[in-house]
Image (cartoon, helix red, strand yellow):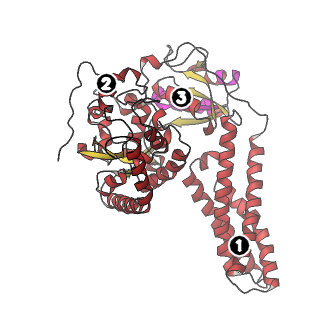
Amino acid sequence: METIRSREPKAEQVSRPRLQPGTTRYQTLTAPAPKTVHTVQPHAVRSNRAPVSPWVSKLAVVAADLTTLALAMALAMAASRAIGVRATAEQERVTLQLALLALPVWIFALAQVKAYQARSVARRSEELRRLISAGAIGSASLLVISDLWRRIDIQRDFVGLAFVCGIALLLVEREVVRQTFAFLRRRGHRLRAVAIVGDNAEGDELRRMFDASPELGYEFAGFITVEAGRRFARPGEVLGRIDDAVDALTRHNVRSVMIAASAVDVAHTSSLVRRLLNAGVNVELSPTLPDIAVERLSIRPLGRFPVMYLQPFHQSGWRMLAKRGFDTLAAFIGLVTLALPLLLVCVAVKVDSRGPVFYRQQRVGRNGRLFHVLKFLTIGPNAHQLRHELAAQNEADGPLFKIKNDPRVTRMGRLLRKTSVDELPQLWNVLRGEMSLVGPRPALPEEAALWSEDLRDRLRVQPGITGMWQVSGRSSTSFEEYSRLDLYYVDNWSLLTDLAILGKTVPSVLLQRGAS
């Protein structure tokens, strides 16, 4: 089997920096190039801070939960009748009354499992786990109340239905709440001002994340510098030095801090945290592991040190067999289901342009094996020669090649690319075992030759039709971000991750986000 071998780029080519000894992936992939360091304009503040207390927001969520749970109880009663459960009118009346009495227990349980703390439900999977725990307590309370008063005869089937309906409706309602807060935050509302301790590469990456993702709920307020010389901070962004951090935060009315752990010496971290907490400042610590999934991290005590354990990642065994089985089944179903639409596309491509219907191009697969990717023909017959002539118009950075209005693309090809229909023949590559439904983008051999040694880790998995790059901006994503997303996927792959990416692919394609 032919494989791609690493080779030095030619003199006229621009190569990606190789990973130097002692350099971490974090430094390689996150430290911006010199030309991207901002040194002129001060940081722009987007916040429209509303004078509404956070408790008002929490009470609004509680009210929404109560309304949702009341609706769930009514739905459970209707479902009980629909499945033909026999109950007297008195039993139904008493059951519904007990269900309403149990609503405060549900709310209390939600509060106990920290379902009203934003930090505890940042991830949907974590929120689901907490909702299920609270739902089990809330449903069990119906049986407890019934047993306390033995004269009360509650419908036993109603308890199970109440649990299912309650969790289902709470998930829908919580997603609406999540999207509502994200909407408000993107417009500058409900943002928490946060200062970053350390203006090194990690601190700058945190700043860029807060600026790019206001839905996280943070507004970057400025840096607390550690060293005497300013590094990544722009003019007007320095709030103070680490020695007078509390006074600086008080002067600027900032009550939250994110510490870039790589910027602060271990000997000074405890003292700094103690001073901040004593001053009533909320403190969070970045663990310098931006490319490790949270699910793989756990904290345990080791003597007087809190130690972070990283769960090993296994890419073999039953996981890969399950991934291959899912890919094969889904690709087969997709090809059978889409057979007629694909045939119509073949006819349209043939009518629109000369040449073959399909375009075969050599790409780099898992472990460097070369294969031919299959796509609908969307470009003219002399596209490869024109690529060299259009090199000056390339809008992508790194070894990628992208032109928004590519003159090589045919009329039908432009529509197929916009809708990503041109990628569907790759289901045949998936069926052959050359690709996966989800994975890094299959690269051209000449692109792979320019990769750093670190980036070649993406060849440990099968390339995919869709992936984190495609659902995170696609052609509008920079090569640096594209590299990080691919490596994050390789290092943290799971079946749930694949399902989540497939779920995000549909709206990304329908809304044509980043398509070109």
CB-based contact (under 8 Å), mark 1 and mark 3: no
Q: Is residue 211 left or right of residue 190?
A: left
Name the residue carrying label 1.
Answer: 76
For marks 1 and 2 on the same chain, the one whose residue lies earlier in the sequence:
1
Report whether 405 appears left or right of 184: left
Please identify the quarter of the rendering in which residue 196 is found: top right
Q: Earlier in the sequence, mark 3 or mark 2?
A: 3
Label 3 to label 2: alpha-carbon separation: 34 Å
Front label number (1 vs 2) = 2
Relative image position of residue 155 (x, y in whole percent): 72, 81
The picture quadrant where one finds residue 67 is: bottom right
Would you name the residue on which mark 3 appears?
Answer: 208
Q: Circles 1 and 2: CB distance less than 8 Å?
A: no
Residue appearing at x 51%, y 15% in the figure: 230
- Asked if residue 401 lies left or right of residue 118, the reply is left
Residue that carries the numbered disc 2 in the rendered image: 388
